[in-house]
Amino acid sequence: GSEEGLARAGEKFRLFIEIQTRDLSQEKQSKFFNDVNLQISIQIKNNTAEKISSMVAVREMLRFETEGYIGNKIAQMGNHVRECMESGDARVMRHAMVCLEGLASMEGTLAAEFVESEIRRAFTSLEKSTGELSNRASHGEVVSHRRHSAVLALDVLARKAPTLFLVHVEPFFGLIWTGLHDRSLAVREGSAQAVRAVLELVKLRRSQYCDEWYGQLYTRAVRGLESQSLEVLHGSMLGIIEVINRPPTRIQRHFDEIARQILRLKDLKLKEDKSGLVRTAVLQSVPYLAGLSPDAYMENYHNGLLKYLIDATASDTERTVAFVCLGQLAQHLAQGGKLKSSLVETVLKAVKSGLQRSKTKVSCVDEVMECMSLLSEAAGPMLSQQRSIHDVLPLMFFQGLRESMGRAVTAMATHVPSLLPDIQERLLNTISMILARKSYNDIRTGSESKVDVKAPRSALKPRKSGTFSGPAPDFVRSSSNDL
């Protein structure tokens, strides 16, 4: 079912538990939960839908406090979660991760033992080298699923049980390259997420070994950039991105070496890289490079890399990534005090072009809207001083109401207050056309209109974001009540 349907099912299950156990003795409560657990054990062996339902049930049981019962069943619930984590199904694994977060956040000796056990289990899955894999495809898939499960688990455990994870940081950095260089894209990306979580942990705890671990990661990543293997190259670029994302001062001295590597790889063509994974990673690295040393970036590399990003917005295969990177670049330069009006105007022109092409080319409207959100936060009032903003606003509303547009106009109204009246008028007219099939100006002059109560609920979402400073017009208020 849909995520909304699963959320409703979870609420009903939690209510069912509360009602069934309300007046039961501790002994009968224990029997009730044993029966539920047995049902989950049976259901988890079935199809994807039932695996997801099982994880929803486990999630709700973890939220339910009952005389220490859940604490005593951590290992059993952990087995359920682990089985789903290794299923290889993305939706099942996502729901299992939520349950793992709940288990890792619990207190007590049994919870700590569970976390330690899961960390060791994840390390074991990463210890086997690629050379040990069987040539049988089915066996390779099983190993890949286990590795994917392992790196996702390490990400969760580093975030939710940081104190327990800290003593395992050294072996983590030794083993995570197995995942970063794995044949599976999902495993490589999951490994990068785990690296990000562990680096955040190291920085927050101000470990005396922080510089050393960053240095080891950097050295290994740079070495991998010389490889001709797609997996090694791509995984090493993902490692570089994590290293230069808010690193300690020591890494900043490697700025020029990192920049040269990025310039070298941006034009690299690998025959087996049909999806452009390396080029995508290079695009994603540019904002973090700018944040690493804004002065050196602006002086030596900005013009060439900005053109690289702008050119990528015209590519059907790269434009979705490029627009988000442009917004991130503006933010990193703003944080370093280096954001210029000329860059803001250049990004706005790219946004205008992207929105104009969205009806005829591969759509990237949501990414363009995210770019506008990031640019608004970075530029602030500077945005209203750009010529292109008056061309961009109508094009944004021309795409129709959607959540990403709601977030973008909210960011613009918040950080560029002078644009608020124009945004309000355009938003009212757009909602009016959806709900009443007339412009707001026509309704305001007193002409009759029939409200279409079947208009999509998403049409009213921008209203909830606070973009209107005054009361909603009558037709919006009446339609909202009917919906």
Image (spheres, rainbow, N blue to C red):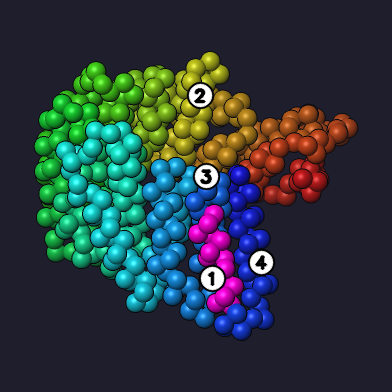
Q: Quadrant of the C terminus?
A: top right
Lower sequence index among marks 4 and 2: 4
| CB within 8 Å, label 1 to label 4 | no
Q: Position of residue 137 (x, y in %)?
A: 31, 33
Q: Position of residue 358 (x, y in %)?
A: 52, 21
Give the Cα distance between marks 1 and 4: 15 Å
Instruction: Look at the image and say whether residue 39 sits in the magenta stretch.
Output: yes
Eyeballing the image, is 313 above or below 471?
Answer: above
| CB within 8 Å, label 1 to label 3 | no
Mark 4 or 2: in front is 4
Q: How many marks?
A: 4
According to the picture, the residue beneath numbered tag 4 turns out to be 16
Q: Position of residue 98 (x, y in %)?
A: 46, 56
The quarter of the picture where residue 30 lies is bottom right
| Secondary structure under the numbered disc 4 in the rendered image | helix
Lower sequence index among marks 2 and 3: 3
| CB within 8 Å, label 2 to label 3 | no
